[in-house]
Image: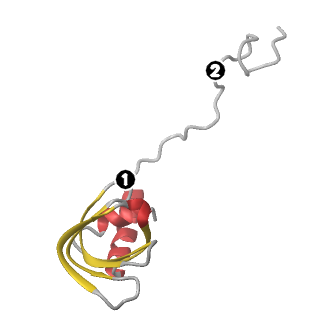
C-alpha cells in the first residue's frame, strides 16, 4: 500500500496528524498532494504539552512537518480492496523484460563483442 493512495482514499474521513514539533491536529481531510501537504477542516489543534487546545475551521499542514498520521481502519480496508480491484483489471501483457537493448551484434552499443 502506497502512502499517497492511502491519503487519497482518506479524503473526507477524520484523521489525526502529529507534527515533528509535537503538536497534533484532529480534523477531516479535504485534500492532499504529492508532497503530502494536507488540507484539513473542522480541526482541533493540541499543543505539544497537551494542555492547550485550539479550534479552527480549516488548516493547511506542510508535508515535511508530518511525523505520523492516524487514519480510521475503514480507510485502510478500502485501500486494500481498491488495490485488489485494480490488480484484477490490469491486462496480462508481455513484460518490459531486458530485451536486446540498443546496439546489437554489429559492434556498437552493448549488444555483443564487436567481432563479426
Q: Position of residue 47 (x, y in %)?
A: 35, 83
| Crowd rating for badge 2 (residues with CA inside 10 Å; few <14, some 14–19, many 20+) | few
Residue identifier under label 2: 102
> How far is disc 2 from disc 1 in space, using C-alphas?
34 Å
Front in this rendered view, residue 15 or 78: 15
Residue at 73% x, 21% y is: 111
Residue at image mark 1:
34
Specify few, some or many for label 1: CA neighbours under 10 Å numbering under 14, 14-19, or 20 or more: few
Q: Residue furthest left?
A: 57
* Quarter of the figure that contains the C terminus: top right
Report the label total: 2
Secondary structure at numbered mark 1: loop
Relative to residue 54, is residue 36 drawn left or right?
right
Q: Secondary structure at mark 2?
A: loop
Disc on the earlier residue, 2 or 1: 1
Q: Residue at x 32, y 80 (%)?
A: 74
Amino acid at each position: 500500500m502506497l502512502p499517497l493512495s492511502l491519503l487519497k482514499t482518506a479524503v473526507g474521513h477524520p484523521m489525526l496528524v502529529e507534527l515533528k514539533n509535537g503538536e497534533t491536529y484532529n480534523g477531516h481531510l479535504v485534500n492532499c498532494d504529492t508532497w503530502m501537504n494536507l488540507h484539513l477542516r473542522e480541526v482541533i489543534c493540541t499543543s505539544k504539552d497537551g494542555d492547550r487546545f485550539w479550534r479552527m475551521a480549516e488548516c493547511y499542514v506542510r508535508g515535511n512537518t508530518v511525523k505520523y498520521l492516524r487514519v480510521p481502519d475503514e480507510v485502510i480496508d478500502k485501500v486494500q480492496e481498491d488495490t485488489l480491484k485494480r490488480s484484477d483489471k490490469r491486462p496480462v501483457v508481455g513484460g518490459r523484460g531486458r530485451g536486446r537493448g540498443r546496439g546489437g551484434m554489429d559492434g556498437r552499443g552493448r549488444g555483443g563483442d564487436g567481432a563479426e
